[in-house]
Image: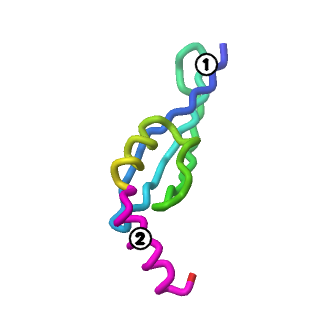
Amino acid sequence: MLEKIEVVDLIEVIENGSIQVRTKTAIKEDGVEISSKFHRHVVVPGADYSAEDAKVKAICSAVHTAGVITAYKAAIAAQGV
């Protein structure tokens, strides 16, 4: 029996408040992993994180304070992005 399992397996908080999220997708056959791949994405301060995994939501809620969001936006503006 083939089974596809997706799990957020790594969450990192970067100095500027961005949250890097790694999701592992594993394919198992009869309980034995036969393939896996990883996908990464970043949740920046001020971004909508309502569709994220519960663990990511909790970290974003704690890290993305008003001060962090303001500092992030100021740093981006200073870079001219």
Which residues are the magenta region? 64-80
Q: In this picture, is 60 found above or below 54?
A: below
Q: Residue furthest front?
A: 66
Mark 1 lies on residue: 29
* Frontmost residue, 73 versus 13: 73
Most distant residue in the right direction = 2
For the stretch drawn in magenta, the main secondary structure is helix
Figure check: 55 above or below 43: above
- Identify the amino acid type marked 1: Glu
Marking on residue 3: none
Residue drawn at the location 46% of the way across and 61% of the way down: 45
Give the image quarter of residue 5. Answer: top right
Bin the neighbour count of mark 2 within 10 Å (Cα to Cα): few under 14, some 14-19, many 20 and up. Answer: few
**Residue at 61% in and 19% down:** 29
Residue 74 among magenta residues: yes
The residue under label 2 is which amino acid type? Answer: Thr
Residue 33 x %, y %: 54, 26
**Screen quadrant of the N terminus:** top right
Q: Earlier in the sequence, mark 1 or mark 2?
A: 1
Mark 1 and mark 2: Cα distance apart in space: 47 Å
| Residue in view at x 41 percent, y 44 percent | 10
Q: Which residue is mark 2?
A: 70
Q: Secondary structure at mark 2?
A: helix
- Relative image position of residue 61 (x, y in whole percent): 39, 47
